[in-house]
Amino acid sequence: MASTLNAAVSLTSSKSSSLPATSCAIAPDRIRFAKGAFYYKSNNVVTSRRVVSVRAEVTTTDTPPVKKVEKESKKNEEGVITNKYRPKEPYTGKVLLNTKITADDAPGETWHMVFSHQGEIPYREGQSVGVIADGIDKNGKPHKVRLYSIASSALGDLGNSETVSLCVKRLVYTNDAGEVVKGVCSNFLCDLKPGSDVKLTGPVGKEMLMPKDPNATVIMVWTEKKPNLIFVVVINYLQEFDKMKAKAPENFRVDYAISREQANDKGEKMYIQTRMAQYAPELWELLKKDNTFVYMCGLKGMEKGIDDIMVSLAANDGIDWFDYKKQLKKAEQWNVEVY
């Protein structure tokens, strides 16, 4: 920023009457103000007089401000709608289908359900929807909204963009006191009958939206508290995965990690990070590309396990993994929802 000081100064000596006021243009870096005195340096001569009045105007010449460049998202965010319906004013949808997709002898129940929304909840792949269970809680208030990841494409199971599907595990467990506890919203959803009303909110979130680039490499990783849920979710959609693989064998790959049934060559239980360790060098090479996107959902410990794998691989290339992961997050290539 450039500036000049235009000053009109009246000075009085100790033995004479007032001198006439003078006007000048002075570079600010050659003026110094001190208590009760005014100093101006010129040609190595310093004059000092008692100040009668100083009228100064500073004129600045500013350079035009740099226009902030809007960051363009790598994800398919254009036109995305969020929170159209909120807990205080939810949308009431209809249950079209609710089917148990686990065998009768499975260790838990998982249900696939389809709700009609008549096109009123226009979601994208990667978003969530909220559900408010009927009834009231122990304090006599309406139940709070619970968020569920959407289990259908943006077109919905019927392909008309008017339905939304969820995949829900019924939560039932015994607490330390020996009491059977049932999850409020999961049991409400799993018990719904076709034709029933269901209060929906959303759509919610942008974190897990898919990338714009149709040629991007997408790595999806997920797990759950109960090891059998990996088995439940993956195996029950096995036919769909097989169809995808048959349709695009060069572009689709799926691996399973079922800790109760599988082990690695060291005899260790096959957790998701154990499986990924088998492909660690390949994964690292993919992560060095600017069109690879990771989507991770599940237990927080899973991310730590993956960190442990990547630290040494990155170090071999002289890269600090944790710094590099921050760069991936900033570039929207590392997308995590863990707890």
Image: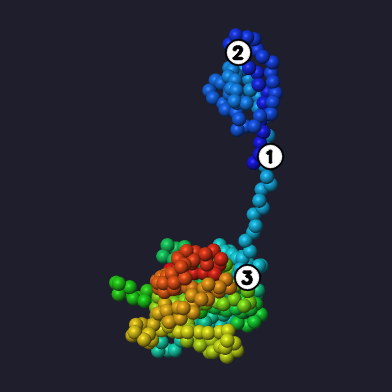
Indicate which disc, 2 or 3, sits on the residue closer to the N terminus: 2
Q: Is residue 249 visible?
A: yes
Name the amino acid type tagged 2.
Ser
Label 2 packing within 10 angstroms: few (<14), some (14-19), many (20+): few
Label 1 packing within 10 angstroms: few (<14), some (14-19), many (20+): few
Residue tagged 1: 61
Camera-nearest label, 1 or 2: 2
Indicate which disc, 1 or 2, sits on the residue closer to the N terminus: 2
Residue tagged 2: 13
Q: Secondary structure under badge 3? A: loop
Q: CA distance from mark 1 to mark 2?
A: 35 Å
Name the amino acid type tagged 1.
Thr
Task: Identify which residue, 280 or 256, lies in the foreground.
Answer: 280
Picture disc at residue 76: 3
Depicted 21 relative to depicted 232: above or below: above
Q: CA distance from mark 2 to mark 3?
A: 76 Å
Quadrant hosting residue 224: bottom left
Pick the quarter of the image with the C terminus. bottom left
Residue at the (59%, 76%) spot, across then down: 216
Count of number-bearing discs: 3
Task: Identify which residue, 159 or 6, lies in the foreground.
Answer: 6
Residue at the (66%, 36%) spot, across then down: 3
Q: From the viewer's perspective, is 23 left or right of 235?
A: right
Residue at the (58%, 17%) spot, across then down: 50
Q: Secondary structure under badge 2? A: loop
Camera-nearest label, 2 or 3: 2
Residue at the (41%, 87%) spot, across then down: 106
